[in-house]
Image (cartoon, rainbow, N blue to C red):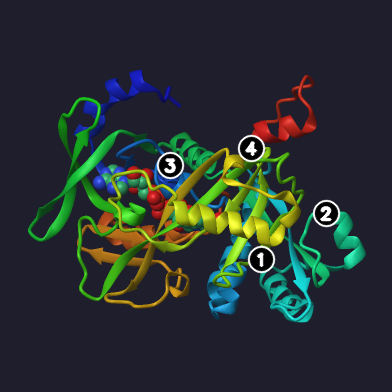
Amino acid sequence: MSAWNAAWRERALPELAAREWDLIVIGGGISGAGILREAARRGWKCLLLEQRDFAWGTSSRSSKMVHGGLRYIAKGQFGLTRDSVRERQRLLAEAPGLVDPLSFIMAHYRGAFPGPKVFGGVLALYDALAGKRNHLFHSLQQLRYLAPGLKEDGLLGGTRFFDAVTDDARLVMRVLGEARGEGGEALNGIEVVELLREEGRVVGLLGEDRESGQRLRFRARAVAQATGAWAGRFRQDDDVRIRPLRGSHLLLPAWRLPVAHAFSFLHDQDRRPVFVFPWEGATVVGTTDLDHAESLDREARISADEADYLLAACAQQFPGARIAAADVLSTWAGVRPVVCAAGSTLKPSDEKREHLLWVEPGCVTLAGGKLTTFRLLALEVLRACAGFVGRELDDRGAAVFRPQPAQPMPALSPAQQRRLAG
Ligand SMILES: Cc1cc2nc3c(=O)[nH]c(=O)nc-3n(C[C@H](O)[C@H](O)[C@H](O)COP(=O)(O)OP(=O)(O)OC[C@H]3O[C@@H](n4cnc5c(N)ncnc54)[C@H](O)[C@@H]3O)c2cc1C
């Protein structure tokens, strides 16, 4: 594999623009990286173009969970939950140190939803979909030991279950690395400004190098748009629209709110689920869910109201910690490309998180989806592109991540070695 740096980029750019590609992927988030990876494994000549830096979009601003999404069960989206928990199990097995188990606790309070029985029932279904029993009820005494600092008033006990957590930006970089290892190419700093059409078919695109301002034409048999919240940019559909919804997070120093587990609870203000979880040596509180009206070309950021909402969540669940705005180390906000019917009047949290593909001759556009299910989405996109490329698409369920050669590093602790391998 050649070096992948600025010098390589400058040298390779004209040559890459001159090639005839089977597939060009627009967007260097997890969806684009997954599509490139699955195409490269099949020997497709494929190139990915990202306007900013890889994972610049939502794929570095998510809640970092690799999960089935318990709330999808509540909405009756069993297929989405089943696919997600199976992908979670696959990623845990393939990428230890990058995708790791995370213990969750749902505390139960007298007279409050969800009670232990209802929640245990939902988790039994969740576990059945994953094919693995993964939850346990803890008495009040055990819970106080596991989770000191929880609101005590009416506390009955808690249910512990497992999902998984990752670093979303690192996940994107590893998937891109795997794609490059099998012949895929990826360039950042190239903004696609136009799709090129001939006789009603997309045959390539016009890209602008954000470093030099130079415009380059790229030709491909198929173009896959994996541009997340930007999916509507090159096409308009009368029946559906992309509803950009923003979710924001607070990052707190771990010593101010030390948690050994992720806590999931319903916010008193609107009964939306909120998480408090340990991540990279700090504590994360998230998320909000509201319409994002600002330009997508500016980095999304938390509003003062959202920060207050998340601080209120801390006060609700961990009153003794007295977390205040001055404790916040940093924040991040991501924009979810939620697909909805034109003119939808649903509350943001009630929109279904399904994804959608638009297919036109020579071009497939993906909108929506999840970090967790990137492999399945990639296969769906490639299936839709295969006819344009003149290929068949088989899926033998091959691993996304090739096994790493074992490199004993005795100077590092087992935890450091695991992380490095990840
Ligand atoms: C707040 C929040 C929390 C979330 N938490 C989770 C979670 O815990 N677990 C989970 O599984 N999922 C989660 N999700 C969903 C998940 O993060 C997204 O579905 C996923 O990251 C979307 O990836 P993507 O590659 O489709 O889009 P993005 O990551 O946004 O990537 C699209 C890329 O396209 C590029 N692009 C756009 N236009 C152009 C152009 N013209 N030319 C070149 N490049 C272009 C952008 O710069 C961007 O990098 C969350 C989402 C949000 C908003």
Residue 18 image position (x, y, % from top left): 19, 33
Near mark 1 (Cα within 10 A), the count class, few <14, some 14-19 or many ≥20, is: many
Q: Quadrant of residue 417?
A: top right
Label 4 is placed on what type of residue?
A: Gly
Q: Return the mark for residue 265.
A: 1
Label 3 is placed on what type of residue?
A: Ala
Residue at the image point whose x is 64% and y is 35% from the top? 404
Looking at the image, tell me whether mark 2 or mark 3 is earlier in sequence order.
Answer: 3
Residue at the image point whose x is 79% and y is 32% from the top? 414
Which numbered mark, 4 or 2, is in the foreground of this view?
2
Looking at the image, tell me whether mark 4 or mark 2 is earlier in sequence order.
Answer: 2
Q: Disc 4 and disc 1: Cα gap in Å?
A: 30 Å
Q: Return the mark for residue 148.
A: 2
Q: Disc 3 and disc 1: Cα gap in Å?
A: 29 Å
Near mark 3 (Cα within 10 A), the count class, few <14, some 14-19 or many ≥20, is: many
Left or right: 249, with 407 as reference point: left
Q: How many marks?
A: 4
Label 1 is placed on what type of residue?
A: Phe
Q: What residue is pinned by disc 4?
A: 422
Q: Is residue 396 visible?
A: no
Q: Give the residue furthest to the left.
A: 199
Q: Disc 2 and disc 3: Cα gap in Å?
A: 36 Å
Q: What residue is pinned by disc 3?
A: 55
> Under tag 2, what secondary structure?
loop
| Looking at the image, residue 166 lies above or below residue 128 | above
| The residue at label 3 has a CB less than 8 Å from ligand 1 | yes
